[in-house]
Image (cartoon, rainbow, N blue to C red):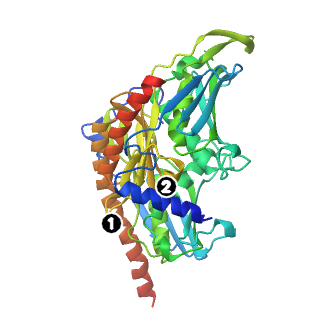
């Protein structure tokens, strides 16, 4: 459904961006302020809340014993869930995750999984029988654009705090832990929107309404990338992708200091 | 499939595990107009991958609240048959299929004159009957053909290909063995070859920017070859129709 008010707002965004300006006076490659609150849930094995401007995401990790996949009997795994909560935006509805939430979860999953920051072999308890599955679940509680980056920061912040529960007779002993889960790299997504032909980092909701295309790049450090995802109907030239990649390295380097 | 821990040389004397060169596509067959009940259709074989696409529309977009008074919608449905993978696939669409449907539809939108079809939908239904790495690229390439076959006006055909890395080598169109390499990087990419615009780009695996530069060049070259095959497949349908007259 088209909303006339959004059309007026996006026209304003487009005319500002043509002059290289943004409604909140940020530079085109500048992020909103980020705040991270650690350990927001005592029941979680690791948890964090992230605010990226007005976008707010809760993330919690639960480690659960499970059976390994037959093709990888000596490896545990991770699972990322994302929920766009109805209270976060009038556009989000109650019910099972739709394609927008599924894409979000899968891209954050890809960024963490492919970075190999969690050694899946270290999650093996008994080969072929028992492994740890690290469930990373995220909840967008207020939506003002760029859920990809906010969720990826929250997921990593929570993961960095994970304590491995104690196992007795293959069951978790509540409240007892055997040590920290080893996180060897700090993978983060960094997203650029293409608006009116210009590249704009960390888009707000109204900027997302005006964007033609979106590109997220996951980086693990200053030289290695671990994930790409292009979204929306527009396109990028290869030169624009190169510029987005450079920005991702630069912006994620700053964010990494906070996580 | 290669056994675990077995050391594979992914490129030996310039040849890959299946005998291809680093910049060589698997054998590809394309045919359009294969489904009488669809407005446009295509069948594509790409190595072991087998894809069938049917396009219905443009038609009124229903339910009505989904309609956009400024442009038409592309509704892309990517599904895999239960027998198309080594283990039986659960017939219920999974998260992977939902995500691929979303990004594949978005990859085609830019190429279609959607502003000509306000309040309408173009439904693209795609089924994979056999797979061996690169099925989403095969799907987008086939879907673009089926949309053209439906007579829907387009700015360009969309070509998609996988590119990436196995055993330290940057290669075009990875097969399953290559995709399972310990250092594998898989980058599905869709391109409108005339304007060199990228409409789909994903990646998983560890990659540097220098490697990406090399890989993107390979992908553009691969897509140029694909576009020639697509044009030939479309031309063939009309040549055959002429002969029947």
Q: Nearer the viewer, residue A14 or A104?
A: A14
- Residue at screen point 49% across, 77% down: B116
Q: Quadrant of the C terminus of chain B?
A: bottom left
Q: Is the Cβ of the residue at disc 2 closer than 8 Å to that at disc 1?
A: no
- Residue B106 at x, y percent in the picture: 50, 58
- Residue at screen point 41% across, 62% down: B158
Say which quarter of the image contains residue A76: top right
- Residue A126 at x, y percent in the picture: 63, 15
Q: Is residue A227 above or below residue B79?
A: above
- Residue B160 at x, y percent in the picture: 41, 56
Determine crowd level at label 1: few under 14, some 14-19, many 20+ residues with C-alpha closer than 10 A. Answer: few
Q: Residue furthest left?
A: B13
Q: CA distance from mark 2 to mark 1?
A: 27 Å
Residue B5 seen in this snapshot: no
Determine crowd level at label 2: few under 14, some 14-19, many 20+ residues with C-alpha closer than 10 A. Answer: many
Q: Chain of mark 2?
A: A
Q: Secondary structure at mark 1?
A: helix
Q: Which residue is mark 2?
A: A232
Q: Which residue is mark 1?
A: B228
Mark 2 on the same chain as mark 1: no
- Residue at screen point 56% across, 40% down: A54
In this picture, residue A207 sits left or right of residue A28: right
Q: Nearer the viewer, residue B218 or B99?
A: B99
């Amino acid at each position: 459904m088209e909303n006339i008010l959004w059309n007026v707002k996006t026209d304003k965004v487009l005319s500002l961006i043509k002059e290289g300006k943004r409604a909140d006076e940020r530079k085109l490659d500048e992020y909103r302020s980020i705040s991270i609150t650690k350990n927001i849930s005592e029941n979680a094995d690791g948890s964090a809340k992230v605010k990226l401007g007005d976008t707010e995401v809760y993330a919690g990790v639960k480690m659960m014993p499970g059976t390994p996949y037959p093709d990888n009997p000596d490896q545990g795994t991770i699972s990322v869930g994302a929920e766009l909560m109805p209270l976060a935006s009038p556009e989000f509805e109650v019910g099972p995750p739709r394609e927008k939430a599924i894409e979000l979860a899968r891209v954050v999953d890809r960024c963490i999984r492919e970075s190999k920051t969690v050694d899946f072999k270290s999650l093996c308890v008994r080969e072929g029988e028992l492994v740890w599955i690290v469930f990373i679940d995220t909840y967008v509680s207020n939506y003002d654009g760029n859920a990809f980056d906010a969720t990826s920061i929250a997921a990593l912040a929570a993961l960095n705090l994970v304590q491995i529960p104690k196992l007795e007779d293959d069951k978790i002993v509540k409240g007892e832990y055997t040590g920290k889960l080893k996180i060897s790299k700090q993978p983060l997504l960094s997203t650029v929107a293409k608006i009116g032909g210009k590249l704009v980092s960390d888009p707000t909701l109204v900027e997302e309404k005006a964007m033609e295309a979106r590109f997220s790049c996951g980086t693990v450090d200053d030289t290695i990338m671990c994930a790409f995802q292009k979204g929306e109907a527009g396109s990028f030239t290869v030169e624009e992708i190169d510029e987005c990649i450079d920005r991702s390295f630069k912006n994620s380097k700053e964010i990494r200091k906070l996580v | 499939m290669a056994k675990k821990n077995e050391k594979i040389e992914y490129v030996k004397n310039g040849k890959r595990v299946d005998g291809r060169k680093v910049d060589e596509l698997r054998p590809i067959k394309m045919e359009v107009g294969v489904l009488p009940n669809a407005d446009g259709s295509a069948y594509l074989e790409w190595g072991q991958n087998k894809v069938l696409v049917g396009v219905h529309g443009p038609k009124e977009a229903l339910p009505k609240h989904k309609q956009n008074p400024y442009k038409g919608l592309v509704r892309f449905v990517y599904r895999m048959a239960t027998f198309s993978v080594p283990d039986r696939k659960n017939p219920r669409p999974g998260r992977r299929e939902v995500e691929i449907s979303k990004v594949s539809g978005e990859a085609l939108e830019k190429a279609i004159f959607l502003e000509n079809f306000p309040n309408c939908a173009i439904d693209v239904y795609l089924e994979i009957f056999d797979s061996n790495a690169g099925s989403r690229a095969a799907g987008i390439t086939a879907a673009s053909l089926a949309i053209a076959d439906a007579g829907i006006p387009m700015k360009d055909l969309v070509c998609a290909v996988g590119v990436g890395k196995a055993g330290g080598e940057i290669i075009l169109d990875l097969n399953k063995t290559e995709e399972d390499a310990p250092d594998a990087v898989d980058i599905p990419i869709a391109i409108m070859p005339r304007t060199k615009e990228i409409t789909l780009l994903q990646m998983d695996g560890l990659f540097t920017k220098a490697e990406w530069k090399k890989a993107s060049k390979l992908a553009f070259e691969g897509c140029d070859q694909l576009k020639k095959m697509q044009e030939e497949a479309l031309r063939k349908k009309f040549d055959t129709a002429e002969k029947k007259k």
